Structure formats: C-alpha cells, structure tokens
Image (spheres, rainbow, N blue to C red):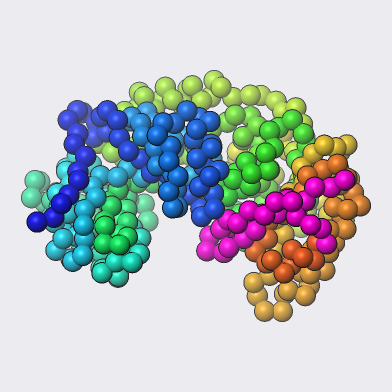
C-alpha cells in the first residue's frame, strides 16, 4: 500500500488556508530568487535544488506570479509518495482530488523531471500520470478531459527523484520569463528571468547609470527599467495558469493588480543606456521597450562598443557577448573579448563591470582579474558571471 501525503481542501477555491509552494528558477539563481522573495515578504522561504520553497495562501500564489522577476514557474505540490513501479505511480496520482482542479471541458498536459529512480522514461511516466488523472475525472463525470501539450488549462508537473514522486500543478501556465513584451528577440536571446537575475546580482538600484554596450534586443535594460520603476513583471502578461482553475478568485486578482499599478514609480534618477552595432537588433530592442511601457526610460544608440563614452562614475557596465559554441568561432571571439577588456581599462574607470560568458578561456582574453565569479546556467549552458572593479 502506498504511503501518500495529500493536501486537504474544503472551501470554494481549491487553495484555502496555508499551502506550500515551489518557485523554480535557473540553476545558480536560487540565492537570488530567495533574496527577492524575502524582500517581497514571502514566508517560509527555503532554498532547494532548482528553486525556492515558500508557504502562503491563495493571494501569495497570485502575488508570486505577478511580482517575481527571477522565478520560472510557481508550482503547487499536491502529493508526495514512494514510487518504484508503474502501479505505485498510478495509485499515487489517483489519490489526488483532481476534481478540485479539472473538469472534462478543460485540457491538461504533464511534464516530468526524473532523476535516480527505477522509472527512467519520462514519456512513460507522463502517460501513466495522464491516465490516472483522466480516469479520475471520467469516473465522476463520464467524460475525459483532452490533452493540450502547448496551451493546457491545467499543467501538471511530476518530479521523481530517488523513487520519491512529487506531483504538483503549475500555477503559472507559460513560464514566467514570457513576460509578453518580447515577440522578436533576435539570435541567442537571454531569457527575461535570467536578465533580471543579472541585474539583481550587480546590485544596481537605479541610482547610478547602467550601460549595456552590446544590448542586442535590450532584455537586460528592459528588466532593469521594470525593477527601478517597481513595475510588476506579470502586469504585461495576458494570462496565467491559475486563471483557468475552478474557483479562480477574480476579485482578489483584480485587487492585487490594482495595488501593483498604484505602487509604480514614474521616473528614474539615473540613465539606462544601450548600444549595438546591429541596427536591426536596436529596432527590436526599441519595440520591446515600447511593449513593456519603458521606452521613455531607456536610450538606445547605434555604435561600436569601442567608442563607448560612459557618463561620469560611479556606474555599472554589463556585457553579454557571444560565447562561441560553433567550431572555428573561438579565435574571432578572443579578439572581441580583448577589445572588451581594452574598453573597460581605457574608458570605464570608476565603474563596476560585469561580464556573462559561457567560455572561461575567452574570459581570460579580457585581461582583467575578476573580483567575483558566479556560476549560473543559461538554459543548459554553464556560464560565469564575472565582476571587474575598474580604477
């Protein structure tokens, strides 16, 4: 017999009273997310692998989706149980009160994350989980919900590690990096959540200039502007997963959105400056800033970063140059990294410089000793975020 821990719910909305939540994030960003959550007043904040656990009520779930800049998803754990066979997986999933969350007219999708367990095929685990869920709904209603892998009404997340299965629902829907302002990002875009994390790590607080001399589609500067204006990143999105839940509290959501809008600032005390040689990318950056509602707070100019002329210090200059993962690119990029080092030494005295790179050997070409080295992941790619103090 499976030992299953299932959350109990008794009121109109499935999330009554206190509940545990898990905010996922990129590897290496867990500390940044935890600090962000504590600053916003979330309770029970605890760092775990791949994210941060916290506790709260329905409003906390909504607020996390609305406000968190560095989280990828807000998961709601429903059950945890030992799972070393297909039958135990099926029985454990069936023990959950799925009728609280799903109707036959809704759609669902299942995502799996497996590690060090007897069950090793994510496709099989997803299928078995789906079968248990739709069988539960069919037993009550005589009809089964359909699967929609791209835009489900209810996303289900299965985490199976060392034969312990945690089943959660995804309150976010599309991942939170999809703010809604970026429709064309250009080549190799930086996710909005990671861009926000970089800004947090630099310690930029809006009181000194922030420069991005290779700004591309402008994501770093847009995220910096949203932070400095105290504008909740979720305000730009059209939809969240929790808005499809039975018992969605629309009045609570409207109140939280109104409070967020009332807390916005209207001006910045220091400039945000972006430049790039590629005018097509600058056009994309300007369009992204416009959709985010921050275009009047960022100055984009066309130019070579070697001609950078920063405002008087102090300030922060942030580089996210190419990493050169394709064969034959590295030598050309060494030249670029040497040029970055020359710009920092010759033009940025009094500034703190930060550089994100996926190539440790390339970073050596900068010719400066890093005062901080932070390991984080840009998708599957392990990167270093380096700080250089310039005198």
Is 47 a magenta residue? Answer: no
Report the side of 357 relative to 27 (left or right): right
Dominant secondary structure of the residues highlighted in magenta in the image: strand
Q: Quadrant of the N terminus?
A: bottom left
Residue 173 in the image: x percent, y percent?
Answer: 39, 46
Quarter where residue 342 is shown: bottom right
Is 371 a magenta residue? Answer: yes
Residue situated in front as seen by the camera: 361 or 343:
361
Residue at the outermost bottom position:
328
Quarter where residue 295 is shown: top right
Q: Name the residue rendered at 17%, 30% in the picture.
A: 10
Report the side of 31 relative to 204 (left or right): left
Residue at the outermost right position:
346
Per the rendered image, the range of residues in magenta is: 367-391
Number of numbered discs on residues? 0
Q: Name the residue rendered at 25%, 44% in the picture.
A: 78
As drawn, 194 above or below 247: below
Can the viewer see residue 78 in this picture?
yes
Residue 112 in the image: x percent, y percent?
Answer: 33, 60
Residue 270 in the image: x percent, y percent?
Answer: 77, 31
As drawn, 260 above or below 273: above
Residue situated in front as seen by the camera: 96 or 389:
389
Residue 172 in the image: x percent, y percent?
Answer: 40, 43
Q: Name the residue rendered at 85%, 37% in the picture.
A: 313
Q: Name the residue rendered at 26%, 56% in the picture.
A: 165
Report the side of 188 relative to 95 (left or right): right
Can the viewer see residue 294 in this picture?
no
As drawn, 377 above or below 224: below
Q: Quadrant of the C terminus?
A: top right
């Amino acid at each position: 017999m499976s030992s299953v821990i299932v959350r109990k719910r008794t009121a109109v909305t499935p999330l009554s009273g206190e509940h545990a939540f898990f905010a996922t994030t990129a590897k290496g960003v867990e500390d940044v997310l935890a600090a962000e959550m504590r600053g916003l007043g979330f309770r029970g904040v605890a760092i775990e692998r791949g994210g941060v656990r916290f506790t709260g009520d329905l409003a906390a779930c909504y607020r996390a989706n609305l406000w968190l800049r560095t989280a990828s998803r807000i998961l709601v754990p429903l059950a945890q149980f030992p799972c070393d066979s297909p039958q135990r997986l099926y029985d454990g999933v069936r023990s959950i009160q799925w009728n609280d969350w799903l109707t036959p007219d809704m759609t669902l999708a299942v995502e799996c994350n497996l590690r060090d367990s007897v069950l090793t095929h994510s496709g099989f685990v997803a299928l078995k989980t789906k079968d248990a869920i739709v069988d539960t709904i069919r037993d009550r209603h005589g009809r089964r919900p359909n699967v929609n892998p791209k835009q489900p009404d209810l996303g289900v997340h299965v985490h199976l590690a060392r034969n312990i299965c945690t089943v959660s629902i995804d309150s976010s829907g599309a991942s939170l990096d999809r703010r809604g302002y970026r429709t064309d990002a250009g080549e190799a875009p930086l996710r909005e959540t990671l861009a926000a994390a970089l800004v947090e790590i630099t310690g930029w607080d809006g009181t000194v200039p922030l420069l991005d001399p290779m700004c591309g589609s402008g994501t770093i500067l847009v995220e910096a502007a949203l932070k400095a204006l105290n504008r909740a990143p979720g305000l730009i999105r059209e939809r969240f997963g929790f808005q499809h839940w039975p018992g969605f509290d629309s009045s609570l959501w409207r109140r939280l959105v109104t409070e967020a809008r009332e807390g916005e600032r209207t001006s910045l005390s220091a400039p945000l400056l972006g430049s790039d040689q590629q005018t097509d990318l600058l056009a994309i950056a300007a369009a992204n800033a416009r959709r985010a509602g921050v275009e009047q707070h960022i100055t984009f100019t066309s130019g070579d970063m070697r001609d950078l002329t920063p405002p008087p210090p102090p300030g922060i200059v942030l580089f996210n140059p190419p990493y050169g993962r394709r064969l034959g690119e590295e030598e050309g990029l060494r030249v670029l990294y040497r040029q970055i080092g020359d710009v920092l030494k010759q033009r940025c005295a009094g500034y703190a410089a930060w550089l994100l790179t996926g190539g440790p050997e390339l970073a050596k070409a900068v010719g400066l000793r890093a005062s901080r080295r932070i390991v984080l992941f840009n998708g599957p790619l392990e990167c270093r975020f380096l700080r250089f103090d310039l005198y």
